[in-house]
Image (cartoon, rainbow, N blue to C red):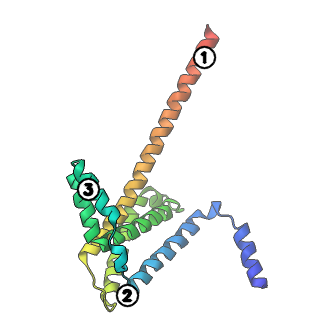
C-alpha cells in the first residue's frame, strides 16, 4: 500500500511540462510495443459482421452522383484493403508520436529535422515489423504493408507541417491586425 501511495504521489507531483521529451519517448515506446503485440498475433481479424459497412456504400453513391470518381476509387480501395488502411492509421499514430518525441528533444538537430527523422525511423520500424510478422504463424511480410506504413508516417508529418504553416499564417495575420489597430489608435492621437 505504501508503494502505491508513493506512485500516486509521484504521478500527481511530476513536472510534466519540463519533461515532455521523456513523456513523448515513453508514449512512443508504448505505442511501438502495441504495434509489436498486434503483429505477434496470428488471430487478428475483423469479425465478418463488421465487414459489411453500409456507410461505405452510401459514401460511394454520393461521390458517384457528385462526379468525384477518383474518390470512389479510394473508398473502394479502403473497403477491399482494410488491412492496408489499418496499417496507415497505426503508423499515422506512430508518426505523430515520433514527431512529438523528436520535436521535444533536447537536441536542436533532432528538433529541426523532426519530420525527416520520424519518417526514417517509422519506415525502419515498419521494416522490422514486417520481418517480425514473417515469423508469426498465419502472418506474412508484405511490401504493400510496408508501403502503407510509410504512407501513414509521412501523412502524419504532412499534418504537422500544415499545422505549423497554418500557425505561422495565423501569427502573421494577428500581427497585421495588431499593427492596423495601433496605426488607427495613433492616427486618433495625431488628429
The image position of residue 75, as x and y in percent, is 27, 61
Residue at x 40%, y 86% (from the top left corner) = 40
In the image, which is nearer the foreground, mark 1 or mark 3? Answer: 3
Q: Which residue is mark 1?
A: 186
Establish if 65 lies above or below 28. above
Establish if 64 lies above or below 136. above
Asked which quadrant contains residue 121, the reply is: bottom left
Residue at x 22%, y 60% (from the top left corner) = 73
Q: Which residue is mark 3?
A: 61
Q: Which residue is mark 2?
A: 43
Report the quarter where the C terminus lies. top right
Residue at x 31%, y 58% (from the top left corner) = 58
Tell which circle, 1 or 3, labels the residue nearer the N-terminal end: 3
Disc 1 packing (10 Å; few <14; some 14–19; many ≥20)? few
**Viewer-proximal residue among 7 and 90:** 90
The image position of residue 38, as x and y in percent, is 41, 81
Amino acid at each position: 500500500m505504501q508503494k502505491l501511495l508513493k506512485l500516486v504521489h509521484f504521478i500527481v507531483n511530476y513536472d510534466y511540462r519540463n519533461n515532455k521529451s521523456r513523456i513523448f519517448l515513453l508514449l512512443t515506446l508504448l505505442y511501438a510495443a502495441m504495434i509489436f503485440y498486434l503483429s505477434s498475433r496470428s488471430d487478428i481479424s475483423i469479425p465478418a459482421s463488421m465487414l459489411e459497412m453500409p456507410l461505405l456504400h452510401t459514401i460511394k453513391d454520393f461521390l458517384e452522383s457528385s462526379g468525384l470518381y477518383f474518390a470512389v476509387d479510394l473508398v473502394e480501395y479502403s473497403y477491399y484493403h482494410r488491412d492496408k488502411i489499418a496499417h496507415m492509421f497505426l503508423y499515422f499514430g506512430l508518426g505523430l508520436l515520433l514527431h512529438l518525441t523528436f520535436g521535444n528533444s533536447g537536441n536542436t538537430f533532432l528538433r529541426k529535422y523532426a519530420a525527416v527523422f520520424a519518417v526514417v525511423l517509422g519506415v525502419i520500424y515498419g521494416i522490422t515489423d514486417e520481418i517480425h510478422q514473417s515469423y508469426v504463424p498465419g502472418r506474412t511480410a508484405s511490401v504493400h504493408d510496408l508501403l502503407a506504413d510509410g504512407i501513414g508516417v509521412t501523412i502524419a508529418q504532412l499534418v504537422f507541417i500544415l499545422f505549423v504553416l497554418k500557425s505561422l499564417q495565423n501569427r502573421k495575420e494577428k500581427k497585421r491586425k495588431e499593427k492596423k489597430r495601433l496605426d488607427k489608435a495613433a492616427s486618433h492621437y495625431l488628429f
